[in-house]
Image: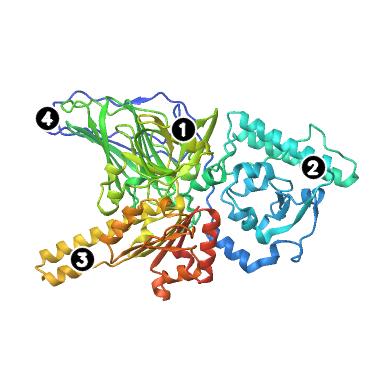
Amino acid sequence: MSCPLALISTPPQSPCSKKPPMTLTLPMLPKSAIALRRTFTPASPCEAMPSSVGIAKLKSKTKLGKGCSLLDWIRLCRSKKTEFCCNDGTPRGISERELARHCTKEDAWTAIRGKVYNISPYMKFHPGGVEDLLKAAGKDATILFDEVHARVNIESMLKFCFVGPLVPNSPSTHRRNSMKIAEAGARIRSSSLKLGSLPLQALTNLQQRRGATQAAVACEEHDGSKQDSPESPVKLFVPSVTKQLPLSEERHEAEESAGRLIVPEDRARKNSDVTKPYPKFDWIQSEKAINIRVVTQCNTMKCSDVIIDLNGRHFEATIFINDWVYELNIELEQTIVSSQVTVTGSRVEITLKKHDSQELWTSIGTFSPGHLNLYLKHNRDTKYHPTTVEAITSITHDSKVFTLRVPAGSYLNVPTGHHLAVRAEVDGESITRSYTPICSNEDLTRHTPAHVEGRSVQLMVKLYKDGKMSRYLSDLNIGDEVWLSDPDGTFNSAKMANTNLVLVAAGSGFTPMVKLLRDFFHTELVAREQETSDNQTDGSTNKQREHAECPTSTAKLLFANKTESDIWWKDEMRQIAKMESERFEVVHVLSDTKDTLPSDGVKGRINSTLLRSYLPSDNDERNKTLVCICGPCQFTAAISNLLLDEDYPDDCIHCFM
């Protein structure tokens, strides 16, 4: 016997209004009843509710506009050359007073390591946004720049923006300014705040102090008599938190933090209500499980668009729908054993397995504040999720793979080409480093269900003796807790459809290539199995079935390392290349010429000749070949320049930074 469905609608919720939690109850029904169902209207877009205890909040990422990628900046510099340096190509000495006058968005100079750069043309290319970059305008930002951007080769990045050397007004003035900046940075480091995550009031105060400083400088220029005083405000350079650069970290470990895609998405950013989805939430139960269903109205949904956090009976689900975020927040009536995520078209289904499989719930539970919230993705505060160390495997003399298990009932499936951050407390300081998760080498050539993949996260990390995060990871033991952030990135795996791959990696830049290869092999595997099945159903000949198994796309991996002992998954890659010889090739490039050369390797560095030999020469084939680059900044910039010299299509290049 089936029971009637009760329809209950809730008005749009606002996180600012404090209403008592709403509990839905129904009379007890016989066990023969198949389902209980509820349907709700979506909430209006609003700011995210405060996170639960133990969840860290970070500033949301600033999205770059179309045409503002690293490749676009390199191309612009090569075309303009001397137009950005404001000196007709001849560097000249810049005094501190002259530097201070260039402090606006349209006319911004900054000094780093004794060199003055015109940063105005770089404003729209800065991943941290214009506001953060303006905090370095008109001043010497060397100390804080080195703290948060130690991995960046500023001389190369702003080569064509170099105005001239900085000439201090006087030794005493320069020394006092440096001391004030250092003291300000020390105060921030000693507090619980992290650069880039200052509260709104603190940022407002900094802006006010910045205005006061500029006024003071103008007064000094007018009468030439003002001297610095201990009370003079100091302008602070506040970096973008979404880049998650180290506060005080050695350069090598910072370069290890690979996985940030800075190439913007092809489509324009859509924030208007025209693109706003209207998801519908309902639930239905059987004797064994609760099935939560959300119709998103987006036909490109994937399992990796869903994050589930389960803590006892408290259930939180975050669903990313293009540029929007939809949240479910429920205090379940009873505990559950596990959860499973499936996506069909625009419908997301979350199955919660009951602890007592013979008992029907009278309601799904109590809706907590923030339930059915719908808001723009760029307004979301980054959340961290607990995991447990399940396994630690050494792969080279200085590198390990950490397998981190999510709690039972939770779900964290990192999309291909995306990264996440590890948060840790080291020496009383909260630090974060970004890493790109991998899959196991066995999963490269076999299909792993998405709901299984979301049960754990694997990180392949190179450990450095003098790195803070490296020290933290080296001390981890089985069973220890590790906090991981929301996944982040802009890589669109749809670009890989019917596409050849050329993957260029150096060192730890290998990590994003792992899932790219997995998706490549899985796509080919599924396509061939489907075509073979269709041919067998149609009674095709053996020759036709053999033709169905022929590969249609190819993948090539150029992997640069210093020595053969530094190569990650050397044997695994060779084995796959042997099994898939018709469509996969790996070439190891070793910079240490004294080291023994492997059979599948070359000595030296990746240059234009080597790169050209693995790139298609035909323009039509180039448009069907995606080149992905990941490694240290200098490596990525060098390979990008080589591709630009070859006039390779910009939309067929992705740089992981």
**Disc 3 crowd, CA 10 A, few/some/many (<14, 14-19, 20+):** some
Instruction: Depth check: give the residue in front, 646 or 569.
Output: 569
Q: Earlier in the sequence, mark 2 or mark 1?
A: 1
Q: Nearer the viewer, mark 3 or mark 4?
A: 3
Asked if residue 61 shows in the view, the reply is: no
Measured as percent of width and height from the top left, residue 524 is found at 27, 61
Amino acid carrying label 3: it is: Glu
Q: CA distance from mark 3 to mark 2?
A: 70 Å
Q: In the image, what residue occupies the spot 70% across and 66% down?
A: 82
Amino acid carrying label 2: it is: His
Measured as percent of width and height from the top left, residue 74 is found at 58, 62
Q: CA distance from mark 2 to mark 1?
A: 46 Å
Q: Earlier in the sequence, mark 4 or mark 1?
A: 4
Q: Earlier in the sequence, mark 3 or mark 4?
A: 4
Q: Which residue is mark 3?
A: 549
Q: Nearer the viewer, mark 2 or mark 1?
A: 2
For mark 2, give the secondary structure. helix
Q: Earlier in the sequence, mark 3 or mark 2?
A: 2
For mark 3, give the secondary structure. loop
Residue lying farthest bottom?
A: 618
Label of residue 32 in the image: 4
Label of residue 49 in the image: 1
Instruction: Depth check: give the residue in front, 585 or 533.
Output: 585
Q: Earlier in the sequence, mark 1 or mark 3?
A: 1
For mark 1, give the secondary structure. loop
Q: CA distance from mark 4 to mark 2?
A: 82 Å
